[in-house]
Amino acid sequence: MTVSRQTFNEVMVPNYQPAEIIPVRGEASRIWDQQGKEYIDLAGGIAVTVLGHANPIMVNALTAQAQKLWHLSNVMTNEPALKLAQAITDATFAERVFFCNSGAEANEAAFKLARRHGNTIAPHKNKIISFFNAFHGRTLFTVSVGGQAKYTQGFEPIPGGIRHLPFNDLAALEAAMSDEVCAIVLEPVQGEGGILPASKAFIEGARMLATKYNALLIFDEVQSGNGRSGHLYAYQHYSVEPDVLTTAKGLGGGIPIGAMLTTAKHAETLAFGTHGSTYGGNPLACAVAHAVFETINTPEMMANVKARAVQLREGLLDIGERYGVFEGVRGLGLLIGAPMSAAWKGKAKEIVNAGLKHGVWTLVAGPDVLRMAPALNITEAEVAEGLKRLEAACAEVTAVAKVA
Ligand SMILES: *Cc1c(COP(=O)(O)O)cnc(C)c1O
């Protein structure tokens, strides 16, 4: 049976509009499409493939576990889940872990924990504060907590008790706090919202206010976590500990897994029977994630993240200056955004498409920001080649724009 991009339109729900190419194979930070054309992968499967494609460490972990045990259910625990949870708690503020299958599920667990936390203290302590442009997933609760109205439109009635404030505005947060707030939820670096890092003062202020009002401080590190920031988790960059941290994406390096991390004390809120997931913590996903975790949580890997981030940023600034398509770069570690210049506002997608034509895969973060979230082990040569191809793409689109 042969399939093509046209097949997508015939058999898939149209909630996505995938690119014209269909990749069939990958190795490290390169992928190849059905026609054998090669691409440098600066997208990393949207901050997921932290060790690149077909990494032997992951292939070995997967195949070894596949020959032993795939699934048990949560009626029984299993060694890979316990080893992964041990590694995570050893390396972070967290003392307890809940496993699930995605970022949205990790946040769903966090928000449910927050509601129960509030409800055990006072009847009206159920308000969740989050921020405009935040993204927390696509379940009904998580899109509602997220700060982009377009994702809830048409899905009403949506869950209540959620208030949105401007990001990085500590005065607004302070004014909105009360004893009715059960949680403050934020991304240390807003990802989908445009690669906007929180300011240190904002994160520190949020920590102080959460403590003062006995609300949980929840960091959504689905995108910023797992080494991407140059630290294992971005909270370590800010030196501010949350009460709850959610992650997914890079945690599995490509196998679906999510996790909610918390303290021993707050973990008690999700007592026996209060929450669950059939696949959450299954041996197959946890064995792969454990291999990924051990590989990324090293000084060498974090040094590479920082070095490649400098290389990418410099390259992007240079391209931006020469072709005028974007101005400046922002982000943290290998989560990088290049905001489009005034002349190219709303056209980030055009650069992505031109990039694919020239053999480099990048992303957008909204219509105005070109985003990159490559593998943490991407090499200097791969970054250089990716930048070269991106430059060729920018040269082409700007030349075409001049003629038109
Ligand atoms: C991607 C993302 C999510 C949702 O993760 P899924 O695995 O798609 O459910 C949640 N929060 C942030 C910050 C994300 O970037």
Image (cartoon, helix red, strand yellow):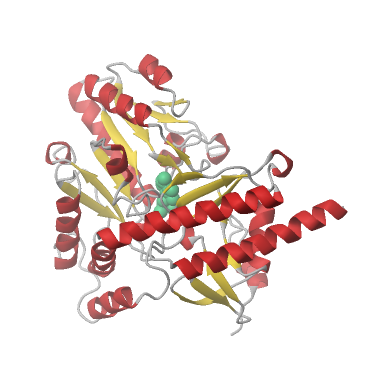
- Where is 84 relative to 180, above or below? below
Whether residue 24 is visible to the viewer of this picture, yes or no, is yes
Q: To which quarter of the image does residue 366 belong?
A: top right
Q: How many marks?
A: 0
Name the image quarter holding the N terminus.
Answer: bottom right
Identify which residue is drawn at 68% across, 62% down.
393
Whether residue 297 is visible to the viewer of this picture, yes or no, is no
Residue 206 percent coordinates (x, y): 32, 26
- Where is 249 relative to 265, above or below? below
> Which of the two residues, 335 or 70, is positioned nearer the viewer here?
335
Identify which residue is drawn at 16% across, 47% down.
96
Residue 17 percent coordinates (x, y): 62, 58
Residue 46 percent coordinates (x, y): 47, 57
Left or right of 291 in this view: 404: right
> Which of the two residues, 98 or 312, is positioned nearer the viewer here?
312
Q: To which quarter of the image does residue 139 belong?
A: top left
Q: Residue furthest bottom?
A: 1
Left or right of 243 in this view: 206: right
Residue 94 percent coordinates (x, y): 18, 45
Left or right of 223 in this view: 346: right
> Which of the two residues, 206 or 7, is positioned nearer the viewer here?
206
Identify which residue is drawn at 29% across, 75% down.
57
Identify which residue is drawn at 62% across, 43% down.
327
